[in-house]
Amino acid sequence: MLPKLSINKILKPDIPTLAVIKKEEAESFILANKAGLSAEELNQVKWHAEKDIDLFRIFRHGADIFIHLIKDKPSQGTNFSEVFRTQGALMYRSLGKYKYESLQIYVEAEEDLKSAYLEGFLLNSYQFSKFKTDPQSHQYQAIQIIADKSFEKVIEKQKIIIESIFMVRDWINEPGSELTAVELGKRIEELGKKSGFTAEVWQKSKIKSLKMNGLLGVNRGSKNPPTFSVLEWKPENAVNKKPLILVGKGVVFDTGGLSLKPTPNSMDYMKSDMSGAAIVAGVFQAVSQLKIPVHLIGLIPATDNRPGEDAILPGDIIKMYDGTTVEVLNTDAEGRLILADALAYAKNYQPDLVIDLATLTGAASVAIGKYGMVAFFKTGEEIKQSFIRASDETSERFVEFPLWDDYAELIKSDIAEIKNTGGRDAGAITAAKFLEKFTDYPWIHFDIAGVSFAHQEYKYYPKGGTAIGLRLIINYLIQNYSTK
């Protein structure tokens, strides 16, 4: 939960203050003296700037002032907004030891940099304490941002997005025994009622009637039934005639099935295998609260993957929702099976664009680690460039991998139309080629396996679920649907 946020035009002398300035503009800050510093304190600012010291504290008997100096030269490959965002996150950690209940933040910089700094600061305030007997209360009860009244809109938008991110992180961090597919469906329904979008959750009988055998096959080893959630946001002023569809992988826990995960620690964090589903739900919360004029549909197939007595066997053949036959050679390649049914079902809407987010392959993580998503584009260049711009603005980065037809050879089956694994080579690509088989529309696939769960805190990501992908999607929607 975020602290209470408010805007104030003038610094108050009785509240602890964080003043942020570009190091190269320290002299201008001194001359303007908006923080109301004494001559001696201004000399401290000048001295620290000259000595290349980034942070120092001016003692004020409980209303201390912290001066944070940021270098005006970002490193190669990093935009300045990301520098401010990351510095804001680091400052949240640095000030934590002082246990202030309230804080006022003054950022002497352009609006986009000010917004980025506050975003990083607030993103790092996340805590998951549901199962702690003595949960740590939020460090700050209230934060005042020193800015003009016009900055309120920026703060309100930021608050909505960050609260959605925190919800996504909560869901990802929830144990698999708590957040079953049925429970996930219930939460999506509740979220829809609260936020203003519609949500329909199909139970096993409906899924069976539709012959979604990819989802049903993965679910065979579990005592818990699957669900398939359909979310929709369709405001009257939607600018797109055909919907944009988001598909999220909802494997609430993945043991690998009978192809049990073999490597040390490989199952420890598999509660996060539903990150794509959580992100789709989080996007719907944010979009409906921001009232973005886009017709949006969400499809979330959900189940766990267990080696129960009726579990699908390696070598089994299943007929998917669209009639495609699949030879299942590895039951740990289950995500593509449930996504394939959802992607095939999406054809019924004749969509403008379909985007799926899935913790799909370890190969994606091996390829680029925790620093970016692996992306596949079956779209025009304009859409791809829009996502590149959104990535630049949010620093939710991706690397595009190819969808060359050659890779389809690796998933040809001798006894069915395709098989669900292509072997060790190009694992992230063959998984994407499998999914592509079920699409006939513009489509983007984000493999978020490497970025969905932070094993160590870094930047503005505490340990646990990250919700990486949500800010990217929201930025894309705002840039491309709010101004048409």
Image: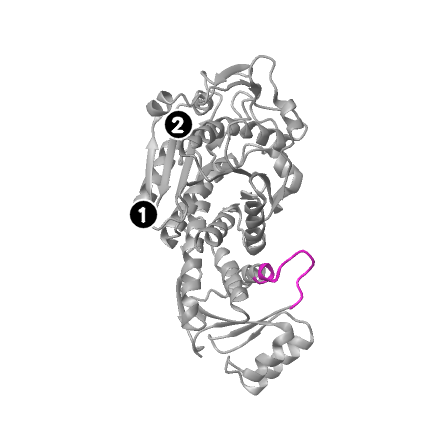
Q: In which quarter of the image is the N terminus?
A: bottom left
The disc labelled 1 sits on which kind of residue? Answer: Gly
The answer to the question of whether label 1 and label 2 lie on touching residues, with beta carbons closer than 8 A, is no
Residue pointed to by mark 1? 196
Q: Over which residues does the magenta segment extend? A: 72-84
Q: For mark 2, what is the residue?
A: 226
Q: Judge whether 327 appears above or below 164 on screen.
A: above
**Left or right: 268, with 213 as reference point:** right
Q: Where 397 falls versus 336 (above or below)?
A: below
Q: Where is residue 249 in the image (x, y as percent from the top left)?
A: 48, 34
Q: Is residue 73 magenta?
A: yes
Q: In which quarter of the image is residue 137?
A: bottom left
Q: Which of 250 and 422 is in front in this view?
A: 422
Residue 410 vs 296, above or below: the answer is above
Q: In front: 449, or 476?
A: 476
Q: Where is residue 333 in the image (x, y as percent from the top left)?
A: 55, 26
Q: Is the magenta stretch mostly helix, strand or loop?
A: loop
Please tell me whether residue 185 is drawn above or below residue 12 in the rendered image: above
**Distance in Å between CA atoms under marks 1 and 2:** 25 Å
Does dot 2 land on a helix, a strand or a loop?
Answer: loop
Res. 209 in view: yes
